[in-house]
Amino acid sequence: MALLEVTDLVTRFRTDDGIVQAVSGVSFSLDRGQTLGVVGESGSGKSVTFLTVMGLVDPRHADVTGSVRFDGNELLGASFSTLRKIRGQRIGMIFQDPMTSLNPVKRIGWQLEEAVLIHNDVSRSEARRRSLEVLDEVEIPRADARIDDYPHQFSGGMRQRVMIAMALINQPDLLIADEPTTALDVTTQAQILRLMKKLQDEHGTAIVMITHDLGVVAELADDAAVMYGGRIVEEAKVQDLFAQPEMPYTWGLLGSLPRADITAARLEQIPGQPPSLLRPPNGCAFNPRCAYAFDRCRAELPELRPSPTSGEHRFRCHLDDADRLRIWTAKKAELTSTEGTAA
Amino acid sequence: MSELLAVEGLQKYFPVTRGLIFQKEVAQVKAVDGVDFTVNAGETLGVVGESGCGKSTMARCIARLLEPTAGKIVFDGRDITHLDRNAMRPIRRDMMMVFQDPYASLNARKRVGGIVGEPLEVHGIGTDEERKRRVQELLEIVGLNPEHYNRFPHEFSGGQRQRIGIARALAVNPKLIICDEPVSALDVSVQAQILNLLKDLQADFDLTYIFIAHDLNVVRHISDRVMVMYLGKPVETGSKEELYAEPKHPYSGALLSAVPIADPTLGRARRQIVLTGDVPSPINPPAACRFHPRCPRFVDGKCNVDEPLLTPVPGAKDHGYACHFPLEHWPMDEDDFRRVGGMVPATPAATSSE
């Protein structure tokens, strides 16, 4: 049984301007010990999907339908006390900005101990012992001296380590990381990604890595899902997604990325901007920006269908198999023909 | 190719003061501490480094938005280091900036026409009617609808706002545009649009760019020459081809190795070099080589005693590094990386004091 099984998740926000369709029918599942990379640009619905999974959207402003089963239990509509037992205990979460997610007026140690004390019937000294242990585990130098520091005394990378420590302190089965390295420098990013991989190997935690960086997904994920306009538009094993992407938006994303391994004279650009979720376009959400769109794309939403090569690889596009293969083969040749020295 | 900008020994120290009234100076933040480089007309110099390496401060000193503590800036054959405001004004026409945050760098209360036309107004170019025509032309050049002349910045997306910032920089036909992280706040698909636009404009208007970014792939894409900075000093400079194919400084190597590769097979096959610790504080930067506390190739008694100077790579056209034990080849794996010229450093790099 999958650890996390999301079916037909829909999140709509009621705003003064109308209804924002942030998530429109997202389904996926994640097994223990696996990493799912969720890629998308701002406004693609990737963060809201997982806020909904965690029960963190405010029901006063949002309508949620569908199903979120975590380890067999339905989370949507679950009581606050049920959710509270799961959040922070069995599902940990890391957010993008470690400064705004730590309490600036409480010591690091206090905040870590709090996470232990809420979920476990242990003494404060036992909680402190565990906090020290987990700070060591996330490689904070001289943890025993730093545990009583305030967040502002830590650098960005160290704060993100503290966030990881806090998310992992109760040994959750699932870790949801929302852009955990976006605010960090590359060398720090490499440290944090390596640390997450190491902790996953040691504890078998499943990870959802939400990011806009295809490079991060390529490095870390087992499965990848590309989101656009509140829907998953392509999902596959990560190798398949990069080797044979099946839909125009994914082609555009790969082509618009300046690469370390490929020298392109000019980046492929996707014209226009991501769609407004207040008034999403008819048919395929990508059609206004898609170079290959035809009448059907403007009228009818493409279903998520399996690719000709693998049933696990699914995508939304009306283009037929022969056309897609032809276009991608040409694009791939274009990419490799401009290839210079590999890094 | 003629030299458009030459910077020599540029330093910028910020005082750290204590006390309300007397503001006793207790320390200095050495944000930029001795930078030399030149930029030729028509080329793009990319400046890479992590936060706190002084790249933005350097840019602001060159544009004279900050007073340099020491050093010399020669722009278009003229020493502009100590020009006063009035003397500087005509020169500002030739040197414009594009900033990182397209939300903060446009006045929210002015209309697009006013924002883009402001440099023309400041420099007293043209009549109202001519300015309006020029602004509409500029909007079209950067790919915006000229009819949006009367809109406010909040009506535009991030990418469109960055186009407005670029149109403003172009308004007075500058020679040099300093771009300070112009794409780091944008989504990838929009980032590609802006990078392509900057390249097209360079070809059309003979522009010279100083392009500051923390993303090595972006810098590699847009630059002709690259300068890698660490804690206020350049550690390596070179043509893009040389520097990316064969980095000499361990910091450049570590940076290159740390960048995620958007190819699962390639990316996972390599053995990444991961540095420990964080960039130290520029208030009391490490002695001698500033990278030594984090350097996997640190040799005690040399790196922490002798400051390495920028040394040219033998045989290379324009490639220099500041390191006593440069990388022998590239790519390298982690073990090779630690082995300095065949010997293993006696003491491993001390854990950084963060």
Image (cartoon, coloured by chain):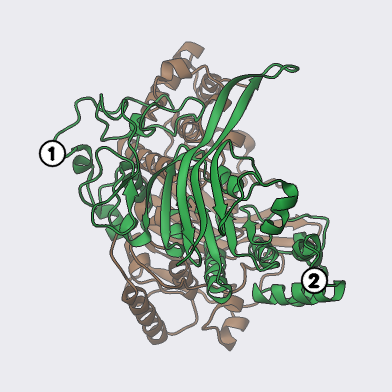
Residue placed most toward the observer, A85 or B18: B18
Q: Specify the amino acid type for callout 2.
A: Tyr
Instruction: Using the numbered discs, state the Cα–Cα distance from disc 2 to disc 1 in whole angstroms.
Output: 64 Å
Q: If you read the primary sequence from the N terminus, does the residue marked by circle 2 or circle 1 appear first?
A: 2
Q: Is residue A149 left or right of residue A325?
A: right
Report whether mark 2 lies on the same chain as mark 1.
yes
Q: In the displayed structure, does residue B270 sit left or right of residue A129?
A: left
Quarter of the figure with residue A215: bottom left
Specify the farthest residue to the left.
Answer: B342
Task: Give the residue number, with chain letter if any, for mark 1.
Answer: B342
Label 2: which residue? B149
Q: Nearer the viewer, mark 2 or mark 1?
A: 1
**Image position, residue A77 (x, y; %):** 62, 46
A343 over B295 or under it: above or below: below
Q: State how many labels appear.
A: 2
Res B104 visible: no
Quick one: which chain is green? B
Q: Find numbered disc 1 in the image and state the secondary structure of the residue it sits on.
A: loop
Residue B257 on image: x %, y %: 32, 49
Identify the chain of the residue marked 2, using the numbered disc in the image: B
Q: Which chain is brown?
A: A
The local crowd at label 2, few if under 14, some if 14 to 19, many if 20 or more residues have their Cα within 10 Å, is some
Q: Is residue A60 left or right of residue B293?
A: right
